[in-house]
Amino acid sequence: MASLKASSLAPNAPSPTPSNTSANGTKRKRPEGSGGVVFSQPKDTAMRNHEMTQLTYAIEHLQEKPDMWFTFKEIMDYLNINTNDGLCKRLKTYFDHNNPSSKIEYDPATKKYRYKPKYNIRNNAELRQYLQNQKSAQGLSVKDLKDGWPTVQDDLRILEQRKQILVRHNTKDMNARTVWDNDPTLMHVVDPEFKNEWHQIMIPAGQDDLRKTLLAAGLKPSSAPRVATTSKPKETKRKSARRGGKQTNTHMGGILKDFSHLRRK
């Protein structure tokens, strides 16, 4: 078979990424007018980012004073935005939009705005009302309450002293972490004599000592190995032999003749 000549071979495929250099090594010039423009960039991106930035500043301003209501003009004055500006009109649309995830609460009666936290709780009275009205006994995270209640840690100490709430504290700073509702009428004082007897019960220090103490008292420790119990097979009842035929007219036994001796065995 004749070998292929070098001139008959197909030329090398071009590179998928065009090079900026020519074949002789000189750098190619970019066409005029390209200028590095990114054509996929929307024209209103800068305007959109500016609106979101101003909206974030407004929410942070309302969050600093979550109890206060502000007019739209007061918020625009804080942002230093003219009410005749087009940005002001676009922000008004964001403020009035009834979105559940929005962090701005709008009151149509007064036409004012304030910060909307995760829970509409801002003082002790609202907290107790919320805990008493909820259907479950689920606790509330203090971190979520602090979103709209800056002084929640100090105010919760008052309710805890009154035994009106149950509080779970952090181990490091002992601040409140979770709160539950509590009924102080259900709390009773334990007799001091019972407390003394309770604290006088000495628990063995070592695990082996505790296990021996439980076994000596006739109790089974939780660390005892499980013993596999073998279940006995169920006894099957033997079926009684079926009688040859069904007896009828038993009430006439004294009148009828007995032919049982003629039955086949």
Image (cartoon, helix red, strand yellow):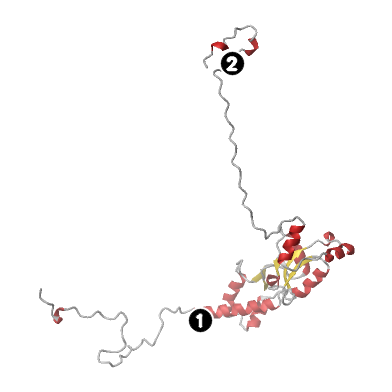
Q: Position of residue 159 (x, y in %)?
A: 80, 69
Q: Position of residue 232 (x, y in %)?
A: 61, 43
Q: Is residue 130 visible?
A: no
Most extreme residue toward the left, as rendered? 2
Give me the C-alpha separation between circle 2 and circle 1: 104 Å
**Along the line of sight, which residue is nearer the eye, 218 or 160?**
218
Q: Please state if 23 lies on the left or on the right of 196 as rendered.
A: left
Q: Position of residue 2 (x, y in %)?
A: 10, 75
Q: Indicate which disc, 2 or 1, sits on the residue closer to the N terminus.
A: 1
Q: What amino acid type is highlighted by mark number 2?
A: Gln
> Element under label 1?
helix
User: What residue lies at 59% left-to-right and 41% top-to-bottom?
Assistant: 233
* In this view, 191 is above or below 169: above
Q: Position of residue 142 (x, y in %)?
A: 71, 71
* In this view, 42 is above or below 135: below
**How many marks on residues?**
2
> Element under label 2?
loop
**Along the line of sight, which residue is nearer the eye, 222 or 35?**
222
* In this view, 212 is above or below 45: above
Q: Which mark is residue 46?
A: 1
Q: Is residue 154 visible?
A: yes
Q: Which mark is residue 215?
A: none
Q: Which residue is mark 2?
A: 247
Q: Is disc 2 surrounded by few (<14), some (14 to 19) or many (20+) residues within 10 Å?
A: few
Q: Is disc 1 surrounded by few (<14), some (14 to 19) or many (20+) residues within 10 Å?
A: few
Q: CB of mark 2 within 8 Å of CB of mark 1?
A: no
**Along the line of sight, which residue is nearer the eye, 246 or 60?**
246
Q: What amino acid type is highlighted by mark number 1?
A: Ala
Q: Please state if 36 lies on the left or on the right of 62 as rendered.
A: left
- Mark 2 or mark 1: which is in front? 2
